[in-house]
Amino acid sequence: MISHPVIWAFRSSVRCWRHRAVLKAALQVSDFSGCRWYSSPIRVGVTGMEEILARVVAPLPTYETRDKSPPPPESNSLDFMHFYKSLDKEDRLSFLTKLSQDFGVDHKSVSELAVKLLDTQLRDLATILQVEDRLRYNLTPRYKQLLNHISRVEGGVKFLVDLRADVLEIISSKASESPHIKDLNGTLKSLLSEWFSVGLLRLERITWQSPCEILQKISQYEAVHPVRNWTDLKRRVGPYRRCYAFTHAAMPGEPLVVLHVALTEDISDNIQSIVREFATLDSEEDVNKINAAIFYSISSTQAGLQGVELGNYLIKRVVRELQSEFPHMAQFSSLSPIPGFSSWLQGLLSQYRKEGRGSDLLSEQEWREVEQATDSPSGTLAVDALRKLIGTSEWLRSERLSRVLEPVLMRLCAWYLYRGEKARLRSQPSGQLPSCKTAPPCGGSTGTPTPAPGVWRTPAASW
């Protein structure tokens, strides 16, 4: 049996060897060309950027050796990621500008191949296809190969998602007007669209038994109806509620898009009954009371995945999931505000008041009901009262006003959506509204298209 002193001596020697190995490896990774990594942002010069980019962005292999070239070492991808994370906002802009401009497409080679392609149009088809393939290969930016290699290291996909978020911020804030930055954004979007295709996504139902970390992220990412507390969150994933999320194997524990669903007897006519009703917190679900699914909130959690279609696929997957769980369910509805309707109606009321054409907007009976409900005389004062009610949403708090205004507003909103007034306004000069000939029909007939059973319906729940 080995004595304790011998064992302790052996363990000490192993620890010393490990410490030396770790220290040596750390120095090799963190020290390149006289620069060292720091956990806090540092200011770097153009020379430092050029050095790291020249080292990690490999030249595009020749066309003949493109499939035989060995991949660069994984350390190149890690060095790029560490270097980029160490930069502050201003240096990141300079870094991305240099990456996209100096390590993109070789325009000279592309021009030469384009001329060659024109010269070969009279040759045989095999020659034409080969030249086209060469041209396609040379149109690939040099940095795309680096992005592909980054995606293969641990945390690489998440890094590229965050990198595109930075690029999108640069474009939206107009911090740079460089077309190379826009081309980098297009390349990143194309890659992310492939990596996050629906076949590679996993549908997860979030419940109160889900990991605490996931529940916390669900709460933080909610962008439509903020979660007030843990009790509120428990209700949103409890009975008569469903919460689903898409996840990706390359980003474990990170929901990409989150969908909240309310299971009801019929389509709800307001959002308050869904997000603020606590009566069903501890109750058991009664299948006989579940006839409709209301999709009342969907949030994308990753800014870098903007433009990558996820939400539409998530809704379709959830519909199939709910149909499997509740075969009798036939109503699926979204419950959302209608952007622009209130502004459109305010402008329409202003124009009709100015031109004295209020009778074209509402029927005589509707105007009499508005006058009685608002205690205002006929004419322009009734129009002003209606404008005020719509602008402040005061009518929602009065049962009397709601009974009078709801059918009127539903008809006008149907006109706004069904007749394409929203698109029409975008194509018209600012302030120009529909003429009398395009005014919504009055007289009590809604003109609202009636959907067939089982199809999507979107109630006008909020203006």
Image (tube, grey):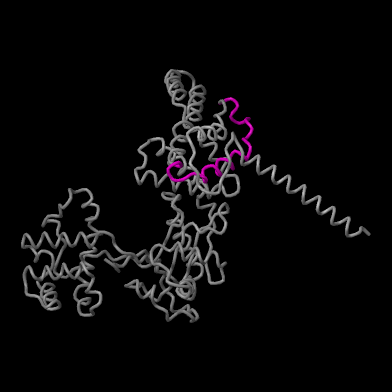
Please name the residue shown 62% across and 40% down the image.
75
Give the dominant element type of the magenta stretch: helix, strand or loop: helix
Write down the quadrant of residue 389 in the picture.
bottom left
Measured from the top left, where is residue 230 in percent x and y?
Answer: 48, 73
Q: Nearer the viewer, residue 182 or 457?
A: 182
Measured from the top left, where is residue 76 in percent x and y?
Answer: 60, 38
Q: Nearer the viewer, residue 8 or 303?
A: 8
Is residue 281 visible to us here? Answer: yes
Q: Nearer the viewer, residue 27 or 1?
A: 27
Please name the residue shown 85% across and 53% down the image.
9
Relative horizontal placement of residue 392, taking residue 307 as reference (left or right):
left
Please name the residue shown 23% across and 70% down the image.
393
Magenta region includes residue 357: no
Measured from the top left, where is residue 228 in percent x and y?
Answer: 42, 71
Write down the quadrant of residue 276 in the picture.
bottom left
Q: Is residue 159 above or below residue 283?
A: above
Q: Nearer the viewer, residue 167 or 62?
A: 167
Relative horizontal placement of residue 3, taking residue 156 as reference (left or right):
right
Is residue 140 visible to us here? Answer: no
Write down the quadrant of residue 34 in the picture.
top right
Measured from the top left, where is residue 248 in percent x and y?
Answer: 54, 54
Magenta region includes residue 71: yes
Q: Which residues are magenta?
A: 63-92
Residue farthest toward the right in the current orientation of the protein: 1
Q: Quadrant of the N terminus?
A: bottom right
- The count of marks equals 0
Q: Quadrant of the C terminus?
A: bottom left
